[in-house]
Amino acid sequence: MDIFRFMLKRVGQALVVVFFVTVVVFLLLHALPGGPARGVLGIQATPEQIARFNAEQGLNRSLPWQYLNYLGQLLHGDLGQSYVLNSSVSDLLSQRLPKTLALSVLSAVVALLVAIPLGLWQAARRNRPADYVLTALSFVAYATPVFFLGLILIVVFSQQIPLFPSQAPQADSWWGVFADPMGLVLPVVTGALGMIAVFSRYMRSSTLDNLSEDYVRTALAKGTSRKVVLRRHVFRNSLTAVIAMLGYYIPVLFGGALVVEQLFNYPGMGLLFWNAAQTPDFPVLLGCVLVISIATVIGSLLADLAQVLLDPRVRESR
């Protein structure tokens, strides 16, 4: 019952945050120089064209009416129209978002598969030469910009040692990108390297905290081997911090995807956002911002729920 009450509370908070996100995006649209009409039609639009556009879109009515109309459009999946690409923003995002999700999920899975055992291994060998070396490499990987990591991988593994193509798969569908797995290697590794550095540090720190707990000392005093304690007790409890961090890392995932997709010409939402910023195509930009904001709220909600389900200590504190 406590978990159910906590879930209802967090879902309610998430809905409130999503509501304020829609308000901010709506206000950003109206804060464009010259208003939404000027932002959509461009600086060459005549006053007559702007007046006609405002009348057609209801932009000559009161702001509360416009917001309610905007909210109704969002509830029906209408994110506006891209006049640069002559297509609805919803259609553009439905085509590009699954590809970005595929790339981001692959990068996150690779990062977790490497970072979790790496952080656990470092904690078990704390303050040894291998721990110092891996810590230094983690700091270097974390401090290096994503685009620079990608460029290094392209130069080394696509030009100097031609193992992988420098361009990502150019499929029209999200499942089509898996038809060229070699083309996915460099984008996925580029997106995963920074995450490995972050998550391995969190896993190491969380493991060290758990190793200092009373239940670990009790298990060791009873004769349980250190490996068994790490595998059966410490590992699960240490995952809580990593899982929470993963939910809060969603905006970073999308931000990294923007750079990776532009660098490897990957046809996802990041590349769409990049091209829209060059145009500029404000409806597409704001549509992407709205989707990323909602995804961040959902990720935070799922991270909190996962913490409660995995760790009884968190559940009791709620």
Image (cartoon, rainbow, N blue to C red):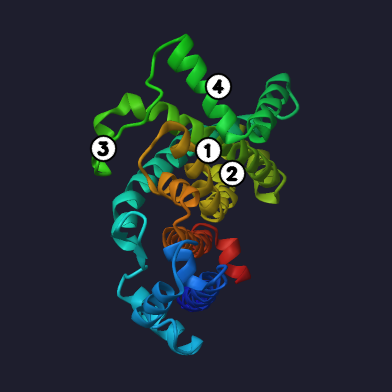
Distance (Cα) linking label 1 and label 2 = 6 Å
Front residue (pair 6, 197): 197
Local crowd size for mark 4, using a 10 Å CA cut-off: few (<14), some (14–19), many (≥20) = few
Which quadrant holds residue 159?
A: top left
Q: Is residue 169 left or right of residue 147?
A: left
Q: Secondary structure at mark 1?
A: helix
Mark closer to the observer (2, 3): 3
CB within 8 Å, label 2 to label 3: no
Which quadrant holds residue 60?
A: bottom left
Distance (Cα) linking label 1 and label 3 = 41 Å
Residue holding disc 3 = 171
Residue holding disc 2 = 234
Q: Is residue 95 left or right of residue 26?
A: left
Q: Secondary structure at mark 2?
A: helix
CB within 8 Å, label 1 to label 2: yes
Mark nearer the N terminus (2 vs 3): 3
